[in-house]
Amino acid sequence: MDQLIKFINNLNAAQRAVIIGSFSLLFIFLIGLLIYSNMKANDEKLNYTIATSLTKNQVMMASNELEASGIPFSIIGSGNNLTLRTNKDNINIAKIKLVTSQTITSKHTGWEIFDKSSLGTTNFENNVKLLRATEGELARSLESLNGIISASVKIARPKESVFTQKKTDPSASAVLSLRQGVALTQKQI
């Protein structure tokens, strides 16, 4: 220790500045290397969101698509509010795969049909939109149930007339595509 102090005391101001600058640069380089390696480690983790608010059926189809493409992913959440995640290197590829295969996009139009409204819509157009939105939301609800792969709902509303006193109720039909081995009970129907 005495030799180190004697060595430092024998240095002039310029030599001391060079040594302090060198150690400072080395320290900054090591801190930068540590930060970079930590960022690289985070990029490899599956913490980049591909899609959110997915149903179990959508996640099942999406996971088949991602596995076939060799993309690592994780599923978080519960019920019909699931999230798919992957690493930074695969996030864009995964999103493109799922969007082009239409596994995570809903094929039913729901209440979002009213998001785009124009001033010139007629009562007839609004009634058609209401019918389509109701059918789409019912189909989505059915597809969220376990064992149902896809659903199609059609609603028949009777025309209103001022000349009839008897009012008939609307009726609906649903066509379900069930997963293999799943059967509906009479109570479920």
Image: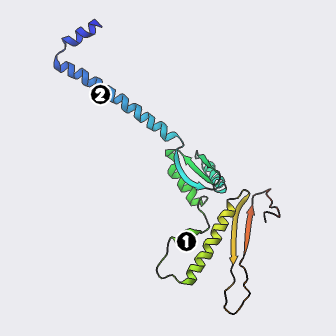
Q: Is residue 181 above or below residue 74?
A: below
Q: Residues within 10 Å of mark 2 (few under 14, many from 20)?
A: few
Q: In the rendered image, which residue does mark 1 sit on? A: 113
Report x, y in % for residue 178.
75, 61
Q: Is residue 165 above or below residue 21?
A: below
The residue at the far right in this view is 186
* Sequence-wise first label, 1 or 2: 2
Question: From the viewer's perspective, is 12 left or right of 186?
Answer: left
Q: Residue at x 74, y 87 (%)?
A: 166
Confirm or deny contact between disc 1 and disc 2 (CB under 8 A): no
The CA span between labels 1 and 2 is: 60 Å
Q: Is residue 42 above or below residue 142?
A: above
Q: Residue at x 71, y 91 (%)?
A: 164
Q: Nearer the viewer, residue 109 or 30?
A: 109
Report x, y in % for residue 131.
63, 76
Q: Residue at x 23, y 8 (%)?
A: 6
Report x, y in % for residue 65.
62, 53
SS of the residue at dot 2? helix
Q: In the rendered image, which residue does mark 2 sit on? A: 25
- Residue type at mark 1 is Ile
- Residue type at mark 2 is Leu
